[in-house]
Image (spheres, helix red, strand yellow):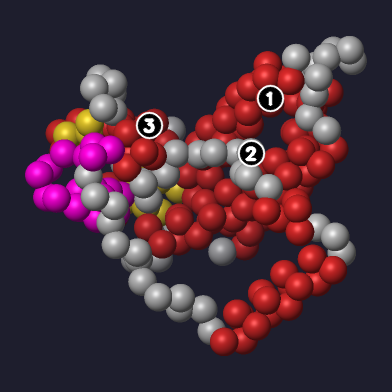
Amino acid sequence: MNKQHLYTTLFLALSSAYLSACSSSVAADKPRLDEAQQQQLAAERAGHLRQTHVRFNALDKDEDGYISRAEFDRSGDSAFSRMDTNKDGVLSAADPKPAPRGEDTRSEQTRTEQIRTEQARQQQGQTQQLRRERLLQMPTTHSVAGMLAMYDSNNDGVVSRAEYEQGRAAQFAGVDSNRNGVLSYDEYVLEFATRLDQQIARTVIDHIAVTK
């Protein structure tokens, strides 16, 4: 969809400017993100936004340009079932980790291209940057820790099925800004970009706090 690509491109273009503003907003005599860290955060933000585009298209099963409540709920049910490995209807840190999602499905050409790209980066002296720990951590439904961060509303260390469904319902309502019962691409990306930038701001503040 042309409009989707337009919005994605716009968000990516704003990444560096946003991060530069976050860093420069700190007084000149205070610690701040260095240039390498700003670039790393910008790259991680761009990666998250690209994945948001992928997630929207994956959820939009009927390809009508919207995520219906049924499509949203179907994805949520699948995520909960996958993480609830002992099938007790509750998610907790004690649950066994789910099995890997499957074997590498990339084509041989794609794998070869990625290997060559990695080798080129190493030759340019960027190996240390590539191995650097992520600065930007966003909760994800791909881990129990992420599920707890997003849906443990009473902070008791577990997420029941009822608690999860309530959280999902609130999440859908929060994204559906025009209250028409479906999520548009604009709504979906804007809501995530807002949370993403809030997390970036916290990341910058946390970094400044520990480097004082």
Query: Residue 87 magenta-drawn?
Result: yes
Vertical order, 109 against 197 (above or below): below
Going by the picture, which residue comes out furthest to the bottom?
A: 108
Q: Which residues are magenta?
A: 72-94
Look at the numbered disc 3 and give the secondary structure of its residue.
Answer: helix
- Point out the image quarter for the C terminus: top right
Q: Which structural element holds mark 2?
A: loop
Residue 95 lies in quadrant: top left
Q: Which numbered marker is on residue 135?
A: 2
Residue under label 1, please give it.
Answer: 207
For disc 3, the marked residue is: 149
Q: CA distance from mark 3 to mark 2?
A: 17 Å
Sequence order check, earlier mark of 2 and 1: 2
Asked whether the residues under the numbered discs 2 and 1 touch, taking CB atoms below 8 Å apart as contact, a structural biologist would say: yes
- How many numbered tags mark residues here? 3
Question: Looking at numbered disc 2 in the image, what kind of residue is underneath it?
Answer: Leu
- The amino acid pointed to by label 1 is His
